[in-house]
Image (cartoon, rainbow, N blue to C red):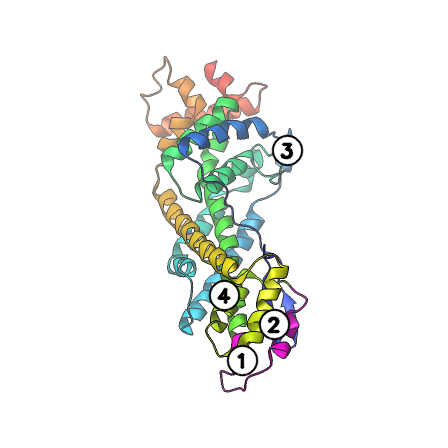
Amino acid sequence: MLIPQILVRKKHSEAIALPQLEEPIRAELFSSERLEQHGESLAAAQRVTTTPRKGRPLLPRVLDNGRVLLKAYRAIAQAIREERAITPAAEWLVDNYHIVDEQLREIHDDLPSGYYRELPKLAESHLQGYPRVFGLAWAFVAHTDSRFDPEMLRRFVRAYQRVQPLTIGELWAIAITLRVVLVENLRRLAERIVHDRAARQEADAVADRLLGLGGSSIEPAATVLRPFERVSLTTAFAVQLVQRLRDQDPVVTPALRWIEEKLAAQGTTSDAIVRVEHQRQAAMNVTVRNVITSMRLISAFDWAEFFESVSLVDAILWTDTNFAGPDFVTRDRYRDAIEELSRRSPHDEREVARR
């Protein structure tokens, strides 16, 4: 398998490796039934700390994600101005960046530090110190390939609460944490888009030297490829170079032979990496499209109705009472009072609601 690390060269004789990229938030795609099962197992596995106020802050990462996404948007927009080819995933990002920017503003406005501090925090796992509801949102995004399906989310949350009840604050935080995770995922995808584009440009520069294009004479393969002798070729770089050199004059045969030997040492072949790259680009396009579409749907969704449909406190209050009589604002005042009483007593919110 190729090492997921982008290689670029500042000069003909110098090769530089950029930092290794983070994997997209993407796991096995689950059906509704399988997602419910996962909700129950996730609830059983997630332990929370006894000191929620000492958790890790989310906002610094969100702000950094915003900077990375803006940089990626500008890089892709520049490529378009230069009439360079871009991938469908890149086109999705640049055409819908205004939606992403809106999400970032809403996250910043809707995630006050005081509210965040009260959310139960995870005691372990790779998300240790972050809110439990953040782990729940992460799992939902991963196993739906970032596709927002309200009914699947409802079933997932209800399944989770069959094992581990969520607080009123956590249920309200689902919307904002879904946004946070989607932005995180888009940041990871955008970095790959930009770095892969840089790798393909580098491959084009190498191919031009090997083919004598751009007003220069043909250079020997040994000279052109020497900077890459001690580094692993990335998928994007190798595929672009192979595609540029195939069906060319026999003079480039040494270069093609070098590429095949290099890929064999990495455990693959040129045919295999072309298939892998096409599959990866298709998957990236689907995920970026899902992220953007989900952001739009989340902004238009009725989260108040969703909250009341999954709230265990509401289920108690709606039983044998006239809780349905008041309007939503009044019902919310009841819930605020229950939260406050629970916070200042040894009883959880459901017990307060029952009493």
Disc on res. 197: 4
Q: CA distance from mark 3 to mark 1?
A: 61 Å
Dot 1: element = helix
- In-front residue for pair 283/254: 254
Dot 2: element = strand
Asked whether 84 falls inside the magenta stretch, the response is no
Residue at image position (58%, 29%) is 45
* Circle 3 residues within 10 Å: few <14, some 14–19, many ≥20: many
Sequence-wise, which precedes: disc 2 or disc 3?
Answer: 2
Mark in the foreground, 3 or 1: 1
Q: Position of residue 236 (x, y in %)?
A: 52, 63
Q: CA distance from mark 4 to mark 3?
A: 39 Å
Residue 64 location, quadrant: bottom right
Sequence-wise, which precedes: disc 4 or disc 1?
Answer: 4
Mark 2 = which residue? 9
Mark in the foreground, 4 or 1: 1
Mark 3 = which residue? 123
| Residue 47 drawn above or below residue 203 | above
Mark 1 = which residue? 251
Sequence-wise, which precedes: disc 3 or disc 1?
Answer: 3
Sequence-wise, which precedes: disc 1 or disc 2?
Answer: 2
